[in-house]
Amino acid sequence: MSEHAENTEVAETVATVPPVGEEIHMPAHSILPLLNAAALAGAIVCITLSWVLVAFFGVAFLATTIRWVADVRRDIAELPLDHSHH
């Protein structure tokens, strides 16, 4: 490998590393998106079976949506407001 290619590779690696002290935010693991999708799918499938099941899955869908949005809002509120170092 030529010296120029090695220098370019090192420069690209250094450019992708975040600066020291910069916090990288990763959302917490959550099963809510899966439950939300399953509740919506259940409600759609049950339209042909029973309105009681549609109501049950609809309530489950709304509950998981509200909880999921609340969790995301809490995560966003925890992020630092100062972005001046970028």
Image: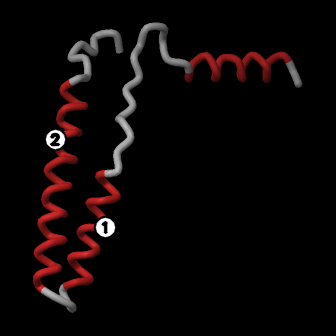
Residue in the picture at 43% in, 8% down = 21
What residue is disc 2 on? 70
Find residue 54 and report its horizontal and vertical position in percent.
15, 78
Horizontally, residue 49 falls left or right of residue 11, namely left
Which residue occupies 79% across, 20% down?
A: 6
79 relative position to 20: left or right: left
- Label 2 CA crowd tier, 10 Å (few <14, some 14–19, many 20+): few
Picture quarter with the C terminus = top left
Tell which of 86 and 4 is nearer to you.
86
Tell me which corner region of the image, top left, top right, bottom left or bottom right, holds residue 37: bottom left
Circle 1 residues within 10 Å: few <14, some 14–19, many ≥20: some
Residue closest to the far bottom: 48
Secondary structure beneath disc 1? helix
Indicate the position of residue 78 as horizontal and vertical percent values.
Answer: 23, 23
Where is residue 83 drawn, in percent x and y? 28, 15
Give residue 36's quadrant in the image: bottom left
Q: Which mark is residue 38?
A: 1
Of 21 and 48, nearer the camera is 48
Q: Position of residue 76 (x, y in %)?
A: 22, 30
The reply to whether discs 2 and 1 touch (Cβ–Cβ < 8 Å) is no
Report, in whole angstroms, how far the alpha carbon at label 2 lies from the one at label 1: 19 Å
Amino acid under disc 2 = Ala
Which comes before the other along the chain, label 2 or label 1?
Answer: 1
